[in-house]
Image (cartoon, rainbow, N blue to C red):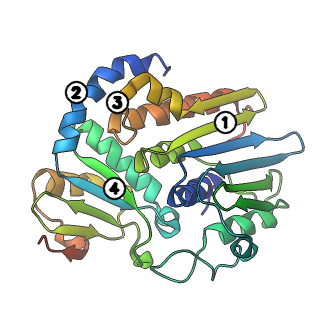
Amino acid sequence: MGELALNILDLAQNAVAAQATLIRIEVAENEEGFLVFRIADNGRGMEQSFLEKVRDPFVTTRTTRKVGMGIPLVDMAAQQCGGRLDITSRPGKGTEVTASFRRDNIDCPPLGDVAGSIAVLLAGAPATDVLFSYKGSRGDFVFDSRSIREELGEACDFSHPELAAWVRTYLQQEIERVKEEGRAI
Amino acid sequence: MKSLADLHALRDKLKSDLKLRKESGTKIIIGMGTCGIAAGAREVMAAVLDELARRHLTDVQVQQTGCIGMCDKEVLLDVLRPGEARITYGNVKPEDVSKIIANHVVNGNIVEEMVVGKIENK
């Protein structure tokens, strides 16, 4: 994928497909030198039997073809740079995917444009809510689409070009404020 | 600087566009499966949203779809104008977006060289 923000967008799309109404996305620069992201949804979840084989690219819920690369790509990217991928899920409750990446490892992909991923996620699935947090070395930032929805009332439409642009610029600005100084993400 | 206070100013604009967006039939649909995202669907959708904002085409709706099985032709972008055939464009790059919007979405002229599929309107 080239940047972790694209993996985050892809995993969040799985949550949309699982009919989640709320997706929690956390990104953290942790003190042990890892970048960690967690995507937790309240969608339909997976049975234990499916969960056990979900890292296999030849396992997918897709009906248009027989290969599913989303989870295997993250699994591989995490393992290549000394991190790991954990998935927990309960049918009817939701799924939680946590991936960690050792930042000083040469194979660690850049985080990339998380703000763009969140804006596009909301634009493509405007009825789904996103609770996004970024824990950086200079502070924490939280964005809750539900408070935007509350503020705008029935006029709230995340697929409206002007609201999508606002979300993207606002998130970029806030991530820039709290992320580790001087490091390109 | 963007702040949550901007939303207050944006609300009236969003509200006045609400009815327009419900009534207009024109849709742009982007493939957002793993294959689409890996091929650049995020940048294409961002380019579409930017171009619509720039041209004030706030009545055009942007939607997403999953993988439709033409993964090698991603990014796939469909244009659906009311009463016309649904046109699928393939291998779409962000720099192709302004051409598709100007020619097809606004003026109704299909960008033939980029078409990979067509579903006639019944």
Instruction: Mark 3: give few (<14), some (14-19) or many (20+) Cα within 10 Å.
Output: few
Q: Is residue B29 left or right of residue A62?
A: left
- The percent coordinates of residue B27 (x first, y second) are 24, 54
Instruction: Mark 1: give few (<14), some (14-19) or many (20+) Cα within 10 Å.
Output: some
Q: Which residue is mark 4?
A: B95
Can residue B12 be seen here? The reply is yes
Instruction: Mark 2: give few (<14), some (14-19) or many (20+) Cα within 10 Å.
Output: few
Q: Amino acid at mark 3?
A: Glu
CB-based contact (under 8 Å), mark 2 and mark 1: no
Residues behind callouts 4 and 3 on a single chain: no
Separation of residues labelled 3 and 1 (CA atoms): 25 Å
> Which quarter of the picture shows residue A127?
top left
Q: First in sequence, mark 4 or 2: give its number.
A: 2
Q: Which residue is mark 2?
A: B16
Separation of residues labelled 3 and 2 (CA atoms): 11 Å
Can residue B59 be seen here? The reply is no
Q: First in sequence, mark 3 or 1: give its number.
A: 1
Quarter of the figure that contains the C terminus of chain A: top right
Q: Amino acid at mark 4?
A: Glu
Q: Residue furthest right?
A: A32
Q: Which residue is mark 1?
A: A133
Separation of residues labelled 4 and 2 (CA atoms): 30 Å
Q: Amino acid at mark 1?
A: Ser
